[in-house]
Image (tube, helix red, strand yellow):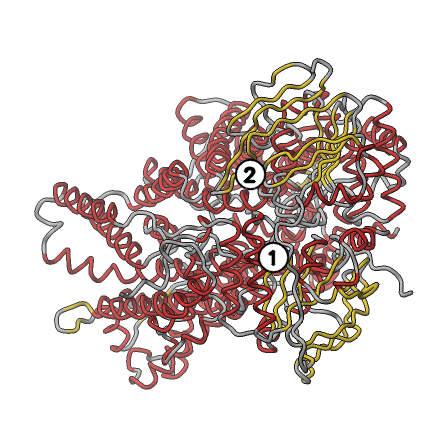
């Protein structure tokens, strides 16, 4: 009998299915003909991957109790570097780039995202900077670099291969959606079945104990942020394909939504808890809501206000159900049981 | 009864599967200095937290100065004159000495504006009372621990104190500072202030106590007059006498040297530590907290490596700069704090057991071979008799003894050459202690070298063949375990 | 003298001086009084906001990022209200302070009650406030604002006429900024409330144990940030004489970077008014310099990012170093 590698109790998996059904039903009622139409479903399938990739990248960083505020900035960076490289290699006529040149440019874009990931990884793993602050710094730095690189302009006109990634279809299924499925499956294997996944969850549960258990926490944390940045890169490519342009400040509202997706999907911001199944459901739910309100011509700014309100609501729910406070409570138990400790110097938080 | 300053009746407290206090009764008169003694995990800290109002008991009542306290919160108890100097000192590291000392006074006065001259005066007054020479403008976070402790004590003296609780106050103080502290205690006593003094340095107990209360395993053993006590009796109160009289006997055979440590030094932690460890032996390290013994263990294990010195394992010189280096050299470590260092409480027993050995279950593509993993887990659960119905339950639900077995089991799976155990039976009830001792002895019997660090002198004597005495960061001596009695060793450990 | 050298503010002041010298030597117009008074006026908005940010950082933990949204909302409300119902600058300030404090208080309540880090809650409230602003106003720009804004913004103390007939002097806005700094200093240094903020930043548990009412202190801090955001909004309107929805929003990180550079720790418990002033001045000089030297202002954004990253790394590095050298054992001398 195969036991699951990582055992943990997650937030709400069954209820998420219920929420999904409820949302779909609600949206269908509000936009009777159009919500469930094949056109809309197809459109959702094209839009979902962007949201999903960013949310998964965010989830990866939350598993160890961290966060990646630079996730969108790194995606933009990828797009910008790729676009600039294309321009450079084709002498200005990016749309005519061959597959080989496109791949080279994409590699450059990926490298830039990984560099960002390495910076964040270094700050968090080796300088022990809290992830929120490290990625805040990285986010502003990358945003600044993005602006400098583009001088505020939009770069556009990309070769067919990139457009295919964003808008193409494989056997009738949207290409980005196919890519997403492959990525999700790979991520599942990585998290549930490999040493790296095991280490991630252990570090998220107790960093000190993980260190004492011969887990190379620094190396794992570094790899974690590199992986998270890779997701940013993938998102960047999809964005290039779908918008056929890149700018320094695209998709900024997605940062908020990816955090929301993680909370909804049952990821504990203190680390150690989070299932891919919950994430997938959460992302689908949010996409359904997004498409649904779009069909109703709701003001997009109202939508961002709504996302903000939803995060607050989720925080409240988690507070009242006491789930997130388990970590804080466990630390208190350890202290109170009075297992003897030398008095720590007061300067230590 | 009526001149009791403090009275607790039938206090009961449980958390996370541990029954910390079992129906405890406790009372104290004005001007009485009571020492509270007991092993780690006996319930001392919990009792103190209940008296100070930080923790609410599940059952029981508290009376202060004859009045029942219906709502024993921290603020309420402070209001009634109960002050605690916590082990963590509870100071503000970013503020000055003067401000830290005067803060409770300022908070209570309710004034909106700050009068800095008043603050400085209050601080100077309090420092004068115990003759503390500290720069009032120094930032507390930058002071050494001993001075920080003085600041904490000065702070308690600014209010209307009826009962002062000191939780292991001398752990990081120099001899001079300790004497100063004991004088302060005597001074406060003469002014009618009651003191509860928690310490496990038995010579301090004999110096300062009027009465002594012993706690063991969540229950009060008894309260005794100082005059009726001596060192032997104290040891007996604390340990409850040996349950298991058996002793570890070293198998006599040709043994090879497993570990040779020479001049291991780490600034602010220990200096010039040198010793040898042979196959099959259990080497004890005795010393109080602040002696550097746990710091030594951490350095050998690579968590906080030494600055210089040599470590030779099995004839090979090893550079240990990380846990990975240490494990590769053949070390394993059961750390001092099981809950914060030894286990990931939220995770299952299975995950914790396999954590150190997981690499051996990794196959192609870094995928984990689940069958191999499950087999290993099952083997160690059986071999160590870990009582868990289902390996998937969270390890926090296990008893202390079983939790410790999980930590040990985690390392057995890596077949280490050298096992370092720091306080392996802390917070484990008496019955489980001896079975853990059996496990430790069997480790040695199977050829590993074991280093056993412990606070408990009887534990060291019964389970080791040699003991190193560590004090102030240095090895002060070495003795054969069967050449010394408990009391003698206790005295040697306590000696300043 | 030694204690002066130890303070990071000293080095910051040196850096500013250095920057001034460099810029001034490349473009002497930098030193013109007119220029200096000019950028002191325009940076008063950031300066006022910075005082609020300082308080939040001292209280502990991650920064508040919603204060610009609060300012933006207040700006619109005040302009629309006074356009509709008339009023003067006093009325404007009143509405700004009250509304700003209220919006800030919401943050304080949510953060304390749910015990979630400030930045996550304020990312959410930022979007709620900003989103709703857009929805209610349709994102429209208001090009005509009541006259009193102009009067307030252009009022000069000690007006002087220069050679070409232009008038310049000390702006009321700069005075307003100075007032905010003075108020911040007074609270932090002279009131128990201020000391409580510092105490909570240093060790919140100890503060609670002492009976400090952490809930109310927190509520005050966030209401204060909101209030200052409101004041900054008025100052901003007085300068730009319009209401544009993303004119203040977007400055959050710039202000936070200035405060961090000024020595406030992102871990809490540390920070001074002097440092905040210097931090804002540094960025103001930098910006002014970029304009005078005709360098692309995009580098300004990079500078902000570098400032935050360096500030964060530096604090962490210091913490790491102090942990490495903590005295665990008082090691005896060799026998």
Q: Tell which of B225 and A94 is nearer to you.
A: B225
Residue A242 appearing in the image: yes
Residue linked to disc 1: B424
Q: Is residue A180 toward the left or the right of residue B165 in the image?
A: left
Quadrant location of residue A93? bottom left
Which of the 4 quarters of the picture holds residue B481?
bottom right
Which residue in the protein does label 2 denote?
B20
Residue visible at 24% across and 59% down in the picture: A47
At label 1, counting other C-alpha atoms closer than 10 Å, the crowd grade (few under 14, some 14-19, many 20 or more) is: many
**Chain letter of the residue beneath label 2 in the structure image:** B
Up the image or down, A225 lies above or below C220; here it is below
Element marked by disc 1: loop
Whole-angstrom CA distance, mark 1 to mark 2, is 19 Å
Q: In which quadrant will I find the N terminus of chain B? A: top right
Q: Is residue A273 left or right of residue B421?
A: left
From the viewer's side, name the closer residue of C38 and B157. Answer: B157
Q: Is residue C228 left or right of residue B355?
A: right
Q: Pick whichever of labels 1 and 2 is earlier in the sequence.
A: 2
Position in image of residue A54 (x %, y %): 35, 60
Depth check: A273 or B451 in front?
B451
Chain identifier of the residue bearing label 1 in the image: B
Taking depth in this image into account, of A283 and B319 the one nearest to the observer is B319
Residue C327 visible in the shown view: no
């Amino acid at each position: 009998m195969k036991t699951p590698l990582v055992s943990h109790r997650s937030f709400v998996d069954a209820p998420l299915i219920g929420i999904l059904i409820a949302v779909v039903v609600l949206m269908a009622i509000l936009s009777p003909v159009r919500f469930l139409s094949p056109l809309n479903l197809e459109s959702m399938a094209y839009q979902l991957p962007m949201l999903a990739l960013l949310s998964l990248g965010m989830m990866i960083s939350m598993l160890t109790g961290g966060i990646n505020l630079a996730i969108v900035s790194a995606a933009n960076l990828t797009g910008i570097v790729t676009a600039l490289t294309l321009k450079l290699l084709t002498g200005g006529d990016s749309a005519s780039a061959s597959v080989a040149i496109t791949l080279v440019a994409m590699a450059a874009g990926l490298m830039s995202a990984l560099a960002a990931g390495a910076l964040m990884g270094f700050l968090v793993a080796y300088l022990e900077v809290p992830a929120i602050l490290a990625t805040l710094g990285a986010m502003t730095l990358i945003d600044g670099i993005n602006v400098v690189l583009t001088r505020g302009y939009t770069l556009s006109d990309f070769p067919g291969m990139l457009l295919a990634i964003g808008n193409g279809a494989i056997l009738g299924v949207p290409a980005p959606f196919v890519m997403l499925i492959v990525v999700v499956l790979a991520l599942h294997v990585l998290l549930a079945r490999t040493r790296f996944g095991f280490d991630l969850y252990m570090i998220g549960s107790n960093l000190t104990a993980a260190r004492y258990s011969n887990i190379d926490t620094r190396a794992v944390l570094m790899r974690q942020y590199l992986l998270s940045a890779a997701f940013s890169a993938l998102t960047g490519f999809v964005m290039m394909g779908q918008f056929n342009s890149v700018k320094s400040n695209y998709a900024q509202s997605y940062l908020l939504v990816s955090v929301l997706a993680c909370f909804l999907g049952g990821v504990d911001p203190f680390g150690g808890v989070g299932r891919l199944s919950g994430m997938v459901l959460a992302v689908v739910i949010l996409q359904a809501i997004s498409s649904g309100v779009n069909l109703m011509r709701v003001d997009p700014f109202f939508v961002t206000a709504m996302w903000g309100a939803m995060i607050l609501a989720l925080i409240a729910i988690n507070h009242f159900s006491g789930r997130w406070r388990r970590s804080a409570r466990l630390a208190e138990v350890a202290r109170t049981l009075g297992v003897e400790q030398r008095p720590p110097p007061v300067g230590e938080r | 009864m009526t001149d009791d300053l403090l009275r607790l009746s039938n206090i009961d407290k449980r958390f996370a599967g541990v029954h910390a206090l079992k129906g405890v009764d406790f009372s104290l008169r004005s001007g009485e200095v009571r020492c509270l003694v007991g092993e780690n995990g006996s319930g001392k800290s919990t009792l103190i937290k209940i008296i100070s109002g930080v923790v609410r008991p599940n059952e029981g009542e508290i009376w202060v100065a004859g009045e029942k306290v219906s709502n024993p919160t921290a603020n309420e108890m402070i209001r009634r004159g109960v002050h605690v100097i916590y082990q963590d000192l509870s100071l503000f590291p970013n503020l000055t000495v003067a401000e830290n000392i005067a803060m409770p006074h300022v908070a209570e006065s309710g004034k909106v504006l700050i009068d800095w001259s008043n603050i400085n005066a209050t601080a100077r007054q309090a420092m004068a009372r115990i003759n503390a020479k500290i720069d009032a403008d120094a930032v507390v976070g930058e002071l050494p621990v001993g001075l920080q402790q003085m600041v904490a004590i000065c702070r308690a003296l600014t209010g209307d104190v009826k009962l002062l609780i000191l939780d292991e106050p001398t752990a990081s103080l120099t001899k001079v500072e300790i004497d100063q502290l004991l004088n302060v205690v005597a001074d406060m006593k003469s002014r009618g202030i009651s003191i509860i003094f928690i310490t496990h340095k038995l010579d301090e107990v004999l110096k300062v106590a009027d009465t002594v209360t012993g706690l063991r395993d969540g229950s009060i053993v008894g309260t005794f007059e100082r005059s009726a006590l001596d060192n032997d009796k104290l040891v007996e109160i604390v340990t409850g006498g040996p349950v298991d009289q058996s002793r570890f006997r070293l198998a006599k055979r040709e043994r090879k040297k497993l570990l040779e440590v020479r001049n291991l030094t780490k600034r602010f932690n220990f200096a010039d530590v040198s010793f040898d460890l042979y196959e099959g032996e259990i080497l004890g390290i005795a010393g109080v907290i602040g002696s550097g013994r746990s710091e030594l263990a951490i350095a050998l294990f690579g968590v906080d490596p030494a600055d210089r010195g040599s470590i030779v394992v099995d004839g090979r010189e090893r550079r240990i700069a990380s846990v990975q280096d240490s494990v590769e050299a053949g070390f394993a470590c059961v750390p001092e704090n099981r809950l914060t260092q030894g286990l990931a409480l939220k995770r299952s027993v299975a995950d914790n057991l396999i954590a150190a050995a997981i690499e051996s279950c990794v196959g192609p593509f870094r995928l984990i071979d689940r069958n191999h993993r499950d087999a290993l887990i099952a083997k160690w659960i059986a071999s160590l008799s870990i009582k868990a119905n289902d390996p998937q339950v969270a390890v926090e639900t296990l008893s202390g003894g079983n939790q410790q077995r999980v930590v040990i089991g985690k390392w057995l799976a890596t077949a280490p050459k050298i096992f370092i155990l720091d306080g392996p039976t802390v917070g484990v009830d008496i019955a489980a202690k001896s079975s853990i001792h059996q496990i430790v002895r069997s480790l040695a019997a199977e050829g590993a070298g074991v280093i056993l660090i412990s606070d408990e002198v009887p534990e060291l004597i019964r389970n080791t063949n040699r003991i190193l005495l560590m004090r102030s960061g240095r090895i002060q001596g070495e003795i054969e375990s069967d050449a010394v009695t408990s009391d003698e060793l206790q005295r040697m450990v306590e000696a300043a | 003298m030694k204690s002066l050298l130890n303070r990071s503010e000293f080095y910051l002041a040196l850096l500013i001086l250095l920057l001034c010298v460099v810029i001034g030597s490349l473009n002497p117009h930098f030193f013109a009084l007119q220029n200096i008074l000019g950028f002191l006026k325009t940076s008063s908005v950031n300066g006022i906001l910075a005082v609020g940010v300082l308080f939040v950082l001292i209280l502990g933990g991650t920064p508040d990022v919603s204060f610009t949204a609060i300012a933006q909302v207040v700006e619109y409300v005040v302009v629309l209200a006074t356009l509709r119902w008339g009023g003067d600058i006093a009325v404007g300030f009143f509405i700004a302070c009250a509304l700003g404090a209220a919006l800030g208080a919401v943050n304080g309540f949510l953060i304390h009650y749910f015990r979630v880090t400030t930045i996550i809650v304020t990312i959410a409230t930022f979007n709620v406030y900003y989103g709703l602003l857009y929805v209610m106003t349709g994102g429209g720009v208001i090009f005509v604002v009541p006259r009193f804004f102009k009067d307030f913004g252009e009022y000069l103390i000690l007006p002087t006429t220069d050679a070409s007939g232009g008038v310049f002097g000390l702006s009321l806005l700069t005075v307003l900024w100075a007032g905010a700094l003075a108020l911040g200093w007074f609270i932090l240094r002279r009131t128990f409330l201020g000391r409580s903020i510092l105490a909570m930043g240093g060790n919140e548990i100890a503060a609670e144990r002492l009976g400090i009412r952490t809930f109310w202190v927190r509520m005050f801090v966030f209401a204060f940030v909101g209030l200052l955001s409101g004041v900054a909004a008025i100052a901003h309107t007085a300068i730009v004489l319009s209401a544009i929805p993303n004119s203040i929003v977007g400055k959050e990180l710039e202000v936070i970077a200035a405060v961090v550079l000024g020595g406030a720790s992102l871990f809490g418990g540390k920070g001074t008014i002097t440092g905040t002033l210097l931090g804002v001045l540094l960025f103001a000089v930098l910006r002014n310099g970029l304009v005078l030297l005709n360098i692309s202002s995009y580098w300004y954004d990079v500078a902000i990012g570098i400032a935050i990253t360096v500030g964060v790394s530096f604090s962490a590095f210091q913490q790491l170093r102090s942990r490495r050298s903590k005295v665990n054992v008082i090691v005896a001398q060799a026998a």
